[in-house]
Amino acid sequence: MSSFVPPNSPASGRGVQDSRIAVDPHTPAEATPAQLRRAVLAGVVGNYAEQYEFGVYAALSTVLASVFFPSDDPALGLLATYAGLALGFVVRPLGGIIFGQMGDRLGRKRILSLTIIIMGFLTFLIGLIPSYAQIGVTAPILLLLLRLGQGLAAGGEYAGAVSFVVEYGPGNQRARYTSFVSISVFAGLLTGTALTFGLSALLGPDAMASWGWRIPFLLALPLTFTGFYLRRAVEDTPEFRRQQAQFASTKQASEEMPSVPLREVFRTQGKAIGIFSGFAITNAVLSYTWTGFIPGYLRREHGLSLGTATLSTSIALLAIIPLLYASGRLSDRIGRRPMLLAATALTPFVVPLAFWIISHGGFGNAVLAQLIYLVPLFFIAVSVTVCLAEMFPTRVRYSSGGIAFNIAFAFFAGTAPLIADWLVLRTGTIMSVAAYVAGISCISFVVVLLFYRETYRKDLADDDYNPPSTLAGASA
């Protein structure tokens, strides 16, 4: 790692790489393999819990529609349920700003411990909400309020988890270790959908609609406590502790890092935030159209049972998990740019093919279509994730990454099932959804081609980034 240059040093100019003085000898050393394994587990557990809840909510969308949004038209109830899903995403940028600023100042570990508690407790409360039949319109209002709270906490989770894992990982294997963050996404979705399938098969549709739907939400509480323990048991990242040592070497030694004003984050990182969001929207739409829309579509349009529809998605989720690890290794070998270009170039061809197959109905076609759908996700999921950390300096990585990620996912992930369902209702064909996903990927392809600069060999040390408001005593 590079050494720190005090702001009044002749060598402190932006881009200068020579004549740097040594960092305090107490600067933390690189993580040992055992520490790295614990750090990866602690980093991914909260994201796993978040995606578990999303998987449950998506798989139970038709059940939740009847419980909280009863209507003579099942399609309208399903749209209302998807709107609740989107609502949780809309507030994520705010959560990214709040928790990101805290994470850059107080450390990744402390804030990630907080976000997992908030998310898990609110998920548990969803399982306790009375139905519309019991308390009327108060039931959906409570559901939407809890989704808002979850969205705020989730806004600070993903970028923090990525920063945590990347800052622990070896410089030449960042995508390999970050692949476990991506794996936690699909592992959480798999757990949620598989549990829903198992309960549906065991209890039957009537029991699931009456009380069985509550079980997966209630199970989030023990998962939350486990994740909190894992996060509290590890040290903060070597990179963040190195920043603390660098700051302590100035005359402003303090137990806490000073905050970087939000306007300064946008001024210095605004371009990178826009570029990241520009190609991350394809990952957002690909992932959440698949996991949030397809199970409900299979039920409503092709008459598959809840268990059968979620089983088809679970098979594809199981298949992508080892592929993501391979994707991370490939990304470390050839770089992020080729992976992103491949994904965005393939999407307009692969997704229409997959949706054409799924439109013919049947369990076999549903499985085959979703396995084909994995091709662009193989290339994009891990590379987007590792870019979230590599594109921003340590000093503002959590806050900048939280803003960039949540801008893309708030407007394109959370709305993906809602837009997809609306398109099918308006056009009568799933191919309209394929056209939407393909159009988004074309935008991302242009962004990567024209604006993205390769980051896979980038040193995470960012000593040339010394905001005067944080190191020279200015106040925001």
Image: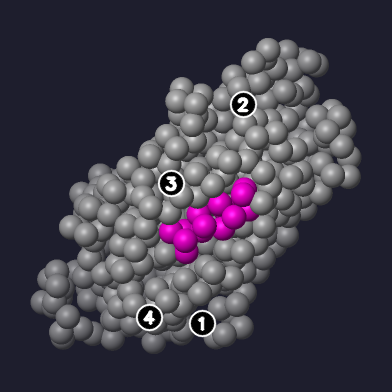
- Residue type at mark 4 is Arg
Q: Quadrant of the C terminus?
A: top left
- Residue type at mark 2 is Leu
Dot 3 lies on which element? helix
Residue under label 1, please give it. Answer: 31
Residue 150: percent from left, percent from top? 58, 39
| Nearer mark to the viewer, of 3 and 1 | 3
Residue 470: percent from left, percent from top? 28, 58
Residue 181: percent from left, percent from top? 53, 63
Say above or below: 198 vs 378: above
Going by the image, does 358 lie left or right of 250? right
Residue under label 2, please give it. Answer: 78
Q: Which residues are magenta?
A: 365-378
Residue 413: percent from left, percent from top? 46, 42
- Chain-order first, disc 1 or disc 2: 1
Q: Residue 468 versus residue 172: which sits nearer the camera?
A: 172
- Residue type at mark 1 is Ala
Residue under label 4, please give it. Answer: 333
> Magenta region's main secondary structure?
helix
Dot 4 lies on which element? helix
Q: CA distance from mark 1 to mark 4?
A: 22 Å
